[in-house]
Image (spheres, rainbow, N blue to C red):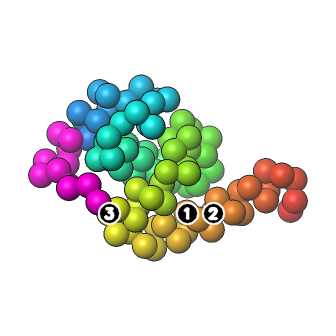
Amino acid sequence: MPTPPTNLAAAYDDALERFNGDNVSDLDDVDKVLVTIWGLEADVNNGGFDQYYFNSSGNQALWAPVALRTRSVPTRRLILSRERTLSSVVKDGVR
């Protein structure tokens, strides 16, 4: 499990400087966790899961449960995994 940074805001700013929107797999584990969780939180709190999946933050949807697990956020992880299942069913045309 990655060691949490002491100054979260500064660590997030640094992670965003290294993140170009497409290179999450190239980031170290701490940066992956920061970029993924903050993108998830920002979009879901602002416009729900619909906004999360529509925006580029949704590109990290497969990494999000792992990132949440490293920060011990079990409730959000459970909701996200259920939402991913539901959205895949809806996207496949099954309603």
Return the disc, 3 or 2, that comes first in the chain's sequence.
Answer: 3
Is 62 covered by the magenta stretch?
Answer: no
Q: Nearer the viewer, mark 3 or mark 2?
A: 3
| Left or right: 16, with 84 as reference point | left
Q: Position of residue 13 (x, y in %)?
A: 24, 35
Residue hosting label 1:
80
Q: Is residue 12 visible in the rendered structure shown here?
A: yes
> Would you call the spot at circle 3 few (<14 residues within 10 Å), some (14-19), or many (20 or more)?
some
Q: In the image, which residues are magenta?
A: 1-11
> What residue is rendered at 40% in x and 33% in y?
26
Looking at the rendered structure, the kind of residue marked 2 is Glu
Q: What element carries label 3?
A: loop
Residue hosting label 2:
83
> What residue is rendered at 63% in x and 68% in y?
82
Looking at the rendered structure, the kind of residue marked 1 is Leu
- The residue closer to the viewer here, 42 or 8, is 8
